[in-house]
Amino acid sequence: MSKTILIVDDSPSMRGMVSATLAGAGFSVIEGANGQEGLDRLQGKKVELIITDLNMPIMDGIQFITKVRAQREHKFTPILMLTTESQDTKKQAAKAAGATGWLTKPFNAQQVLQTIAKVLP
């Protein structure tokens, strides 16, 4: 059975590119267009990894990570932030919220897959 990854990003094209990369590597993918939709998609699902954007409407990536970490079943699920932002203050805020790692856009498919290999058991 393949491992499932949740992608949360408000850009349909970015979700599509990441989803295609992950599906091509054998992962099952669930998508959400913002933090709230991401939380809704998590309900009752087992995911091995979450990839989220930072800047999104309704609920941003930091708020999303904070709410995910508050859920017992996702307390230790690896979460990667994939964003155009690169400021240290944003990275520190994401880390404080519970992000496992940080990747910048535009993303390199090989780099994303290598990072996933490092954080997935």
Image (cartoon, rainbow, N blue to C red):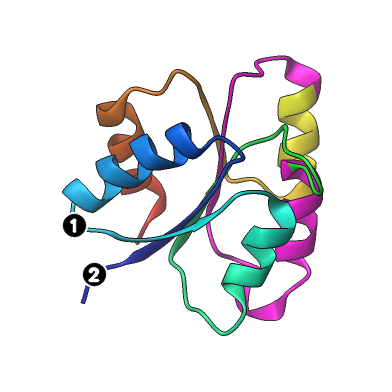
Q: Is residue 77 magenta?
A: yes
Q: Where in the figure is residue 33, as x and y percent of width and height?
A: 61, 49
Q: In this view, does 84 lie above or below 14?
A: above
Nearer to the camera, 56 or 3:
56
Q: Which residue is drawn at 65% across and 45% down?
A: 99
Q: Is mark 2 on a helix, strand or loop?
A: loop
Question: At which x and y percent is residue 51?
Answer: 51, 47
Q: Please provide percent x and percent y for residue 96.
A: 79, 43
**Residue 68 image point, x, y percent:** 71, 64
Furthest residue in direction front, as rendered: 12
Tell me which numbered mark, 1 or 2, is placed earlier along the sequence.
2
Instruction: Report the residue marked by disc 2.
Output: 2
- Residue at 49%, 20% in the rendered image: 105
Which residue was labeled with disc 1?
26
Q: Give the range drawn in magenta.
A: 61-89
- Work out whether 109 lies above or below 25: above
Quarter location, residue 13 = top left
Asked if 67 appears above or below 34 in the picture, the reply is below
